[in-house]
């Protein structure tokens, strides 16, 4: 059975978070001085925001993640925002953090160009790289293996003379993600008696499943029909099994709708499309609420660095 697929959000600039740096309605808060984490140690630049996603071979998926980080840059043009990955794509998150916090790893620009002024790059006055600090924000929806292992390793102390790094918590769970997923279901035309299967990527870490169940519990408060969970890998039930179970208990005339709890198209989304549902929602990104969550996670972790 082929699934009806909701069209992806356009992600046009008119729908994204942006505006003047002085406007108080930007994602993550307001002007820089009022944003938690905006101020760092006296005389030091704010920590670099390293947006770390899983990585994908899917061109559309890559573009969606870039769009999310572009929205973050538009909302906080004062921040140095860099992209990193835990798998599939380059650069690896540990390498990006090292380039920021380790002077010897910084890009050296003998011309003293604009790029040399960034943390981890060349000091245009002294001609040597200087250390900066970094906050890794996992662009992941739960606390799975990559957060506990790859991201945690990436922010380990590099030793004397280096900058500091901290890992933010993943994007989920968060009430705004519940609202966003409910909106995706509404856009797909979900009916009150439809059975909804929340499709998550899956992880071998129990904490990741708890995060997804928290999301599903919030969705049950918004949807009258049954809401269950399925996983793309490493956890059970699988999405096809969850879809089959939902169909077996389906009310007459109702449908099985998969709510894709995924940021972007790619390997797992392709598996969700093939799971046998009647309707599959679009992934979550881009959306202004995601931009706000990323900046909130950054601000929380930046405060821990400032307190060191």
Image: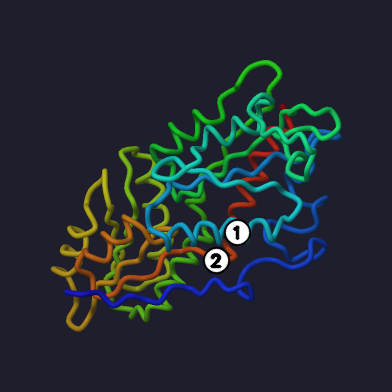
Q: Number of callouts in the render?
A: 2
Q: Pointer 2: what residue?
A: 287
> Residue 307 appears in which quarter of the rendering?
top right
The residues bearing labels 2 and 1 have C-alpha atoms spaced at a distance of: 7 Å
List x then y, in percent, for residue 173. 48, 51
Q: Nearer the viewer, residue 283 or 195?
A: 283
Q: Which residue is depicted at the point 22% across and 52% down?
A: 237
Q: Pointer 1: what residue?
A: 291
List x then y, in percent, for residue 15. 61, 74
> Residue 22 appears in which quarter of the rendering?
bottom right
Residue located farthest toward the bottom when viewing the structure as drawn: 253
Residue 96 to residue 257: above or below: above
Under tag 1, what secondary structure? helix
Q: Which residue is depicted at the point 52% across and 65% down?
A: 286
List x then y, in percent, for residue 195. 27, 71
Left or right, 116 with respect to 3, comes to right
Under tag 2, what secondary structure? loop
**Which quadrant is home to the N terminus?**
bottom left
Left or right, 23 with respect to 153, comes to right
List x then y, in percent, for residue 251. 19, 77
Residue 154 to residue 140: above or below: above
Left or right, 117 with respect to 185, comes to right
Q: Which residue is depicted at the point 73% across and 43% down?
A: 115
- Other-residue count near label 2 (Cα within 10 Å), few / some / many at <14 / 14–19 / ≥20: some
Q: Nearer the viewer, residue 236 or 166?
A: 166
Image coloring type: rainbow
> Residue 278 appears in which quarter of the rendering?
bottom left
Residue located farthest toward the front when viewing the structure as drawn: 111
- Other-residue count near label 1 (Cα within 10 Å), few / some / many at <14 / 14–19 / ≥20: many
């Amino acid at each position: 059975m082929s699934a009806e697929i909701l069209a992806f959000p356009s992600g046009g600039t008119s729908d994204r978070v942006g505006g003047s740096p002085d406007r108080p309605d930007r994602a993550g808060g307001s002007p820089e001085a009022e944003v938690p984490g905006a101020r760092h140690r006296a005389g030091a630049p704010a920590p670099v925001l390293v947006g770390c996603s899983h990585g994908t071979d899917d061109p559309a998926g890559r573009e969606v993640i870039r769009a999310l980080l572009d929205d973050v840059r538009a909302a906080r043009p004062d921040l140095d925002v860099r992209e990193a990955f835990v798998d599939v794509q380059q650069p690896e998150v540990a390498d990006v953090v090292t380039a920021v916090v380790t002077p010897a790893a910084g890009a050296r620009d003998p011309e003293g160009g604009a790029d040399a002024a960034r943390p981890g790059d060349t000091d245009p006055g002294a001609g040597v790289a200087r250390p900066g600090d970094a906050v890794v924000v996992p662009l992941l929806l739960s606390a799975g293996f990559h957060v506990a292992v790859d991201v945690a390793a990436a922010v380990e102390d590099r030793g004397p003379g280096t900058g500091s790094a901290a890992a933010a918590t993943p994007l989920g769970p968060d009430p705004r993600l519940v609202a966003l997923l409910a909106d995706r279901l509404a856009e797909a035309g979900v009916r009150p008696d439809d059975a909804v299967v929340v499709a998550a990527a899956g992880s071998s870490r129990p904490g990741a499943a708890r995060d997804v169940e928290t999301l599903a519990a919030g969705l049950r408060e918004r949807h009258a029909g049954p809401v269950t969970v399925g996983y793309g890998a490493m956890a059970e039930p699988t999405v096809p099994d969850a879809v089959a179970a939902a169909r077996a208990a389906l009310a007459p005339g109702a449908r099985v709708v998969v709510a894709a709890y995924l940021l972007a198209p790619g390997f797992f989304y392709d598996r969700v499309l093939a799971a046998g549902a009647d309707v599959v929602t679009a992934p979550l990104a881009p959306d202004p609420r995601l931009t706000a969550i990323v900046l909130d996670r950054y601000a929380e972790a930046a405060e821990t660095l400032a307190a060191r």
